[in-house]
Amino acid sequence: MNTSVKPRNRILIIDDNSINVELLFQLLNYAGFEVWKALDGKQGLEIINQKTPDLILLDIMISDWDGFEICAYLKSHPVYAEIPIIFITSLAESQQKVKGLKLGAVDYITKPFDQSEILARINLHLKLHALNTQLKHEIHQKKQVEQSLYELNLELEQRVEERTAQLQITLEELQQAQENLLDREQQLHYKAYHDPLTGLPNRAWCLHQLQTLIQQVKSNSNYRYAVLFLDLDRFNVVNDS
C-alpha cells in the first residue's frame, strides 16, 4: 500500500496590509496550501532566499519596496525567474496591469477578493507552471539523449574509420607479402633451371624439356625431335676460378 503524501504547493503572500494577508492566509491554508506570509518586500525576499515558493501573491503598493520592482528583480534572477507571480491590487487602471504583465507577472487579483476566483486562478497557474516545468524537463532529457546519441555516433564513426584504416594497412601488407612470395617463387624457379654463372638454361631445364618432348611423342607417334648437345671445352676451368 502506498502511504506517500503528495507535497502541498507552497504560496508566499507579500502584502503590507496585515488584514489582507490574514484573509488570504486563512483561505489558502484551508484549501490545503502551505502558506508563508511577509508584511514587506524585504521580508518577502528573505523568505524566497531561504525556501523557494511555488507561487507568489504580490501586492503592488508595498511601503518599503514597489511590487513592480520586486517582480522585475525576481524575473531577472535565474533561480527565481520561473516562479509564477500574481499581483494583488486595488488599482483598476489597465495601464498598471499591462506594466505588471510586461514585467513577467502571470495574472492579477483585484481587491476586494472573490474567494472562488482567487482559488481558481491560483490552481490554474500552479497547474500551468507544473506542466511547463515538466515540459522543460522532458525537453532537457530529450536533448541529453540526442547529445548522447550524437556522441555515440561520432565514436562509432571514429572506430569504423580506425578499423577501416587498420584493414587497409593489413590488406596492403598481404598484397605486398603475396607479391614478395611470387617474386621469390619466380627467382627460385629461375635459379632451378639456369646456371648461376652464365645465366643459361642448365641440366635441369634440359631434362624438363626432354620429358616434355617425350610426353608429346607418346601422344603423337608422328612427332619427331632431335637432341643437340653443346659443350664448352674446358669450361670447368672458368667455373672453378
Image (cartoon, rainbow, N blue to C red):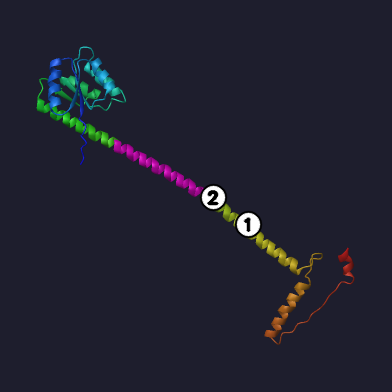
Left or right of 88, for residue 77: right
Pointer 2 with pointer 1, Cβ within 8 A = no
**Extreme top residue here?**
63
In magenta, the rendered stretch is: 137-162
Q: Quadrant of residue 97?
A: top left
Q: Residues within 10 Å of mark 1 (few under 14, many from 20)?
A: few
Reply above or below: 127 against 176. Answer: above
In this rendered view, identify the residue nearer to me: 149 or 233: 149
Reply above or below: 36 against 132. Answer: above
- In space, the residues marked 2 and 1 are separated at their CA atoms by 16 Å
Residue carrying label 1: 176
Image quadrant for the N terminus?
A: top left
Verify whether residue 54 appears in magenta. Answer: no
In the rendered image, residue 196, in percent from the top left (x then y), is placed at 79, 65
In the rendered image, residue 138, in percent from the top left (x then y), is placed at 29, 38
Q: Amino acid at mark 1?
A: Gln
Residue carrying label 2: 165
- Could you tell me if residue 76 is visible in this image? yes
- Could you tell me if residue 90 is visible in this image? no
**Extreme bottom residue here?**
221
| Overall secondary structure of the magenta section | helix
In this rendered view, identify the residue nearer to me: 102 or 136: 136
Left or right of 236, for residue 77: left
Image quadrant for the C terminus?
A: bottom right
The residue depicted at 10 percent of the width and 25 percent of the height is 115
In the rendered image, residue 99, in percent from the top left (x then y), is placed at 21, 21
Q: Quadrant of residue 72?
A: top left
Reply above or below: 71 against 166. Answer: above
In the rendered image, residue 86, in percent from the top left (x then y), is placed at 19, 24
Label number found at residue 47: none
Q: Quadrant of residue 184?
A: bottom right
